[in-house]
Structures are given as structure tokens and as C-alpha cells.
Image (cartoon, rainbow, N blue to C red):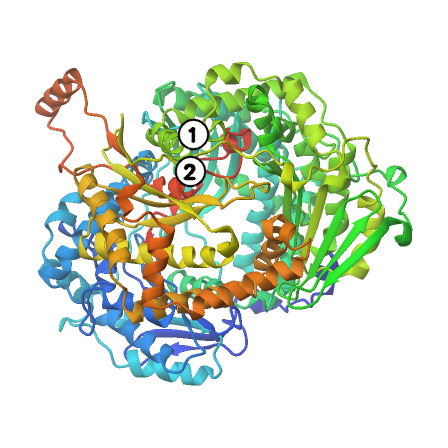
Amino acid sequence: MGRVFDQLEEVDVEGERYHAQLPLGPEGLRHGTLDNGMRYYVRHCAKPKGRCALALAVRVGSVVEEESERGMAHIVEHLAFNATDSYSNHDIVRLLERIGAEFGACQNAYTSADETVYTLTVPTDKEGLLDETLGVMAEMAFKIRCDPADLSKERGAVLEEWRMSRDAGGRLQEAHWQLIFQGSRYGDRLPIGLESVIRRCTAGAVRAFHGRWYRPQHMALVAVGDFADLDSVVGLITRHLGAAASRSPEPPPPLPRFDYAPHETPRYKVLVDRETEHPLVYVSYKHPRMRISTPSDFLDHLALALFEIALNNRLYKLTRLPEPPFASASVSDEPLCATAGSCVLSATALEGQALPALEALLTEVARVRLHGLSPAELARAEAELVADIENTALEADQGYCMDIRDEYVRHFLHDEFVTGQEYEARLSKTLLPRITRGAVEACACKCRPGDSCVVKVVGHSRDCTEAELKQVLERVAAAEASHAIGPWEEPPTPDALIAPEALPEPLPPGEAVVAERSWPAPLHVTELTLCNGMRVAIKPTAFMRDEVHITGFALGGLSEVPLELFPTASLAGTLAGHLGVFGLRPDVLGDVLAGRRVDLETSEGAYYRNMRGVQSPGDLETALQLVHLLFTTQVRLVPDEVAMAVKLVQQGLEAQLRNPLHAYHQRVRFVNYGGCYYFKQMTMEEFEHIDPALALAHHNLSWKNPAEFTLVFTGNVDREALEPLLCRYLATIPRTGLPPPKPAKEVTPLPYSFPEEPVVEDVKVSMVSPVAQSQITFPVILNRPTAREELVWLSLTCRLLETRLLQRLRFVGGDVYTVAVSPFFGCVAPSQDGDPRGDVAIAFSCDPANKDRLVALALEEVALLQEAEVSQAEADTLANLERLAFENSQAENTYWHEVVVTGYQSKSYQLLGGDLGAVYARNMEAREKVLSACSPAALREAVRRLLPTPPTARYSAISMLPRPPGLLHRAGAALAARLLGTGRSGAGSGGGAGSSLAGMGMGGGGVATATTLGAAAVVAVAAVGLGLFALRRRHAS
């Protein structure tokens, strides 16, 4: 058992308490019901300091819509940020920006089948702001204005969101939802709604929907934050919301309840979408949604968690076989809707191997029913669960207000228990010994063909039929009935990472540490140089008790590799990772590390080799053992395993070609980086010439010389406790006869360049649903002597431009769902002495018919910012948001860790003689200097200085457009529509942009890591799988 786990005090759950409702907590929580029936929850939370998280939860979603209203719950959510009785023309958005509320796309609201939730995070350290914000939320609850003009403005943004949902993932998600809820109201009530309703619904109909369902009895207000007086917050909530009522004079209708339709006969479906990248297999077993409100319920939840951990570990081991049945697989229990949940088996299949993947999934669950789980499997699962419980206990008072707010939202919506982290950890310890092996194994009995089973296969081509899916199910059932499925054969596992007799003898501290220096607060960093040349930087913090960040880096990456060997070297990490870089196969390593919070991954970018991860302070010795093994073991070529890794990479490369965005992204990178080899996708011809032995040799050489590396530790780390581990595991890494570390000035830069003249191109690609994706990119050159200040000005410029474009393209025009503006300087080499060169990219998706107009509007907006000054209010808002974001970040381990790591890697570190403290002081001085000077005139000058003036003087505008279908295709489609009565409604329909903005968030089409597709990306279960069941439209309405 764990160290902290053993010290937890148990909870009394004897007798009637075992089935009694768990207490809503923790102590100090204020909760109750207002006079109008509205619920409230108020709780103190000091993280982040001076902030609070608010939520308005409404038990109304798309499932209550009538056929003519499909999509209205989502439209109402959008209108809440558009216009209310007291605010119009998106004044709410401007107000929230002014007061420093966090606001942006995918951040402030969502609509699901059962609920609509509005969320805000606002400062509490300025008098009157909470009062004002609660007034806004009261308007959202009861005073949404649904005038025709308001609806007209927002209709375009909703349509664009609908268009974004029509990519391969969205299409398959809709088909799955309809299949799994066949026979239920939920089946045809996706939150996004119907295009026809979005286009043609009237303001009166939307107003009637809002008045009918937005009732105080269906609502709760949650406020969690750094409050000085909880009772005064309750008073504000009561004043703003306690007497509020619906606009409708009619009595409130009861909330309808829609159950799923159970079925004993399994349903089968093979879905084909030519844009699907990987073949996917799903088996789901529906059941009533699990409620966790009593100790008895929670014990069932813990038993299920143990089952999932154990079975997932077993499924992972199957992926390590010489001929694995699938690339990846998992089991999880997912909530589907308010009344139903589902146990889901999912797998990413190898190409053409969906049926073997399905059979393997079903067989393993049947094997558990027949033979159970081994004692070793259960012990590892329990160790993992205990580690989670310890983490919960250690960080009981260190949760963030946003996360705690969401817990109370779920309590209101789904009766999920909230007792506080400390009580939950104690309850877990109390119940864990009561869980029997039989109870864990019984979870497999809920996954039988008669348990409302749905089997689905998704692929880019049809390689099996529904009849064959049924045959697989029947074949496994027959094998189980005849006991033809044997027991699981547990592979041997070593007792430790390093055998006791092989542990290195620690060096005396005086011999291990040959140099030391430190920098005082606020940096408070100690640097030790070890006898083998490795540097160690220690940055202790008190932000999180159970967290230590580790990053190790060394100069010299893929830019040093000869061009002809680049494809082979860029796959070195993938192939080595598949074999195991710490001396053990990954599946064996997982067993050895069971119950330990250790995470360490390696990577190689253009200029650096990196290892990075987050550890528990109690497991630092294990983490440093991994570092020791990384440097002292050689990854050796195992033909069968390398062949499988190569096969997975090949499948990934082929899969990318099916994505409409692939050719587009390739062209964006080619144009913006002058055809630089680093940003090109590996071709199949290059892939065929990969030399695995040479790739592994590259990996082994990259992780051999300790003198090249600096390791940074940030978090709950104490030098006195860490130093003995450094003396044993790091200082004993042998010196090598390799050349000394490469100086920063000798690093080979990437040969990249931005076009000198404007480039405007359309990349026409074949796609199922038409959508346009546009990226406008500008070159940015920073003046080296003032580069610190210029980076701050550039951050403000990007924030300003993104805000302006959102206002113009989204809030005024309704032409886009969101816009992203991002800088990128990842190509700047540590050896570069001249002015740093990067770019700024504007990215959005839209209706193809609007592409040219929106690109022109974006360029026009940049020109306007260069010609006319912004208002003083805009300038103040920008500076305020920047300060608030900075204040929040200073209470994060991640921030301080990156300060130290990037400080070492910066050009300033070289120029200031290796003085990390001076680097930080200069950066803070530059930041404050810019924010203090942030005036309308200074912002205009920054936009003129940083971006080409006029913007059309030098830029690229690359857009993805659908390739028009050929004559034969059009004729066939028309004939099918006449004969079958089918056809796609709406000239502007289509999507393909569901994940495009994430893909375009690369600041101009590039990234600072290798661009070849690794096996880790290939084997990851696609987002359309495990994320399939949320089905919520999350965004800033």
C-alpha cells in the first residue's frame, strides 16, 4: 500500500450508512434553494488567487426539442452572449473582456442532449466585479433577447459550427448516435440540430422555447473561488436571481424523461467514410446510467475502475504481440445521456483487420468471465488505484476553482456526489478492502451480447459486412459456452527496474558534485554540475504537493543529420520507443511501474533532444532510475518488433493521405518555409528506404553522453532529499569518449525562408462535405537588441487582432465560428546571431462561397489597425488581460519550469554569460516596460512595426477548397437523388473543419518537432471513439 494511503483515517460506513446518501461537502459549503426554486452552491477555493469560477447550469438540452425546434437549445445558448434586455450587439462579450473574465472559443458554454451550461472565470480582487458578473448571468438566465435582428446576427455563426461538425468524425458520430439510441427520443436529437431549422427558425419560435424551458426550477448557480465572505456571495446571488422568473406566464412544464430502448438482439453496423484515417471497432453495451450517491454506489464504482485498469493492461499487452490483433484497444464506462451509460470496448484495427480486432476484444472479456483475473493483474490494478487515491489526498486543498465548480454542476445535473477530496480519499481507503475479486470480475458479465449490444466498424472502405460481425459475435459466444477459451497466460515481470545487485554505488557528494551556483528569489534556482558533466537545476515550489516536473535537454537535434539520413533519423524515436528505451519492453515496464506516478518521454526536435515528464515526489528515485537506464542501455534491434513498428508507421502515412487537410497543410508549410525539408511529410518512397538499424544507432548515440544534458527539476522537490539520488543515478552515468557538447553557436540552422512576394493560392482537394479553410500568414522580424520587448508587443498584437477579427467575422458578420491568431518562432536556431525571424498566422474555416470575402476582410482589419488607433478602453483591456494571465501563471509549476528551461535555451543566456537570474530579470523588465507603455498610439505603431505595412505588401493566403466533382459524379448523384429521393440540403452544407483549427494552431504551418508520423500517433484511438459520447457543443457563444 502507499505511504499516504496508510495514514488516511477511515470513514464510518457501517449499518444504514452504507446505503445512505453521502454528505454534500466539504464543511463550509453554502448551498440551498432560492425562493423561486433555483439552486445555488458557493464554496471557497484559493486557486487561482483572486479568481472565481461561475456556472449557470440549466437542465434543458436538445432532447426536449420538438421536431420543428431541433437545434433551438443550442441557438438559445448562442443568443445569451449576443443580446439580453440590458446588453445588445455582444456588449456582454466586451464587458467580460473589460473586467478580465476568461472568454474565448470552446470555453464559455456548451449544450448537450440534457443540459446547457454557461461558465465564466472572473477576478474577485476588484470591488464590484462579482456583483456585475452575477448580473450578467441573471440576464443570461431569464432575459435573453430573441429579436429577429439578434437571431439573424447569430444564425451565421451557428451554421458555421454546424458546418464544422460535418467532417468525418462528425458524420460518423451522428451515425453512431442514431444507431445506439435507435428507438429512443435521443436518437434524433443531436445538440447541433438540423440545418433547415438553423436557417429558417423564427425569432418567435426561439423566444417561445426559451420562455417555456428556462425556468428557475430547472437551474442552479455555482460560484467557487477566492471569496473573503461566502455569505455575502450568497446574498449577491439571492439579490440577482432569487426573485427572477421566466417570461412565460404559463406554468412550468415538467422536465420529460426519455429512457433508452433496451434490446436483447445485438445491432450491427459497418460505416464507410473515405476520409476516415484508421479502421475503428466499437462494441458498446448500454445500461442505466450509474449513479454514485451512497457508499454502496461508490464501492461499485471502485470495482469497475479496477476492472477497467486490469483489462486495459491486458489489452495493451496484446498490442505487443509479434502479430497483434489491433494497434490499440481500451475499455471504459461512458455516460451517454441523463438516463443511460455504456460500457465501451474500442480498438484501432490494422488495415483490413477489423474482424480479428473485434474477435480479440470480445474474447478477452469472455476470458475474464471464464477464468477471471490473475492475482498479479488485480494487485497491479489496486496499486494504480491507490496511487490515484494518494494523489487525491495530497492535493485535497490544492484544487482549482474551475474543476471544483464543474463537480457541483454535475451534482446538480446528475446527482454526482461531492464530498471534498479529503473525504473522498478516506472513503476510497475504507471501501477498497471490501472489494472482492468476484465483484471486479463480475463487471465483465455486463458485457454480453444480450446487454443492449451495439457493434460498429468504421473504415475508409468496406472490408467486412454486418453479417460477418454477427458471425464473430456468435463464434466467440460458442467458444465461451464450450470453454474453448483458455486462461490468460501472465508473462513474467521483473521485481524492479534495476536488480538490487545491479544498483550503482552512490558517489560521495564531494566527488559527485564538482560545481554549484544559485540564483535568489524570485527565481530561487540551484544549479549543480556533476562529475560526468551533466548539469542539474533545482527549482523548489509549494504549489502542488504531489508534482515534480522534469525536463532534460541537450543541444543538437535533427538539423545536424545529413539530408539523405533525415527520414531514418526522424523515425529513430518511434522505433526505439516501440522496443523500449529504458531497457525493458514498454508492456513489461508498465507492470514494473504499476502504482508509481512516473512519466518520462523522449523526443528529438530540430535543435534539441528532450526528455520530459511529471512525477510524484515519492517516486523520484524511480524516475532517476529511468534516466540512468536511458543513458546506460542500448536499444537493440528485434526484427519482429521492428517490423510491426514499421507497419504501424506505414499505415499512419497512408492514413494521412485520406485526410482532406493533408495536402493543404503540406502546401502551407511548403510556401511559408520555402520548401524546407524539415516541414515536409515523409513520402512512401522515402519510407521504403528507412534503415531501422541505423535509426536505432542514431537513438543510442543521442542518449549516451551525459555531459551534453541539463536536467531541470521544478515542484515539490527538496535538494537535501534529491542529492543522494543524483549521486547514485545521475553522477554514475559513465563519461564517454564522444566529442564535447556542441556549442550553441555551432548548431546548424534550418534552411527556411518566407516568400518575398505575396502568395495567394487555393488548394483544391476532394472532400465529402465542402468547407473552406484559410490561413493568412505574415513574416515577422524582431530587432535583436529589443527582441524581449518586441515579443511582448507581438503577444498584445496577436490578442488585439484576434479580438478584432472575432468581432468582425463572428459577432458582426456571423461568417465564422472562431478565428485563431498565433505567432511562431520555432525555426530560430540557438546559433542565429541576427534578427529572429518568425511569422504570425490567422486561421479560420468558413463556407467556401465566403472565402475570398473573408480573407479580404481579415487583411482589411490588419490595415485598419495600422492606420487608426484603437480606443483607450481596448488598450487598457489588452494590458489588463495580459497582467491577469501572468498573475495566474505565476502560481503554476508549469510556468516556472518553462522559465528555467527556456532561460537556459535562450540567446540571452549566451549573451549574458550564462546568468539565468539576469535573463529572467531582463525579461520581466521588458514585460513591465511594454505593459506600462501600452497606449493606443503605441499599439498602432507595434502593429505597423511587426507586420508588413501595408499587410498586402508581403503575406501568404493559402486556402483549402473542395474540388468540384467530375461530370460523371454529378450525373450519378443527380440520378440517385431523383430515383431515391435523397440529396444534401442547403447549398452551404458541409464541414471537414472539426479539428482543422487545432491542426492550424501551428503559427504558420510549422512545428518545432519532427514532422514524420510516429507509431505513437498511429496507434492512438481516434477522437471519434472515446470522445464520442459527450456530444456537446462547447464554445464561447
Considering only vertical position in the picture, is 817 above or below 986? Answer: below
In the image, is residue 397 above or below residue 306?
Answer: below
Q: Position of residue 510 (x, y in %)?
A: 90, 54
Q: Indicate the position of residue 589 as horizontal and vertical percent values.
A: 70, 36
Disc 1 residue type? Leu
Q: Residue 984, located in which quarter of the rendered image?
A: top left
Taking the spot 57% from the left edge, 38% from the top edge, the residue there is 312
Looking at the image, residue 843 sits to the left or right of residue 246; the answer is right
Say which of 734 and 187 sits in front: 734
Query: Percent position (x, y) of residue 266?
Result: 37, 32
Kind of residue sitting beneath label 2: Gly
Q: Is residue 806 left or right of residue 388?
A: left
Q: Which mark is residue 1025?
A: 2
169 and 332: which is toward the camera? 169
Question: Which quadrant of the rendered structure holds the C terminus?
Answer: bottom left
Numbered mark located on residue 280 in the image: 1
Mark 1–mark 2 CB contact (< 8 Å): yes
Q: Quadrant of residue 308?
A: top right
Neighbourhood count class around disc 1 (C-alpha, 10 Å): few under 14, some 14–19, many 20 upward: many
Residue 351 position (above or below residue 152): above
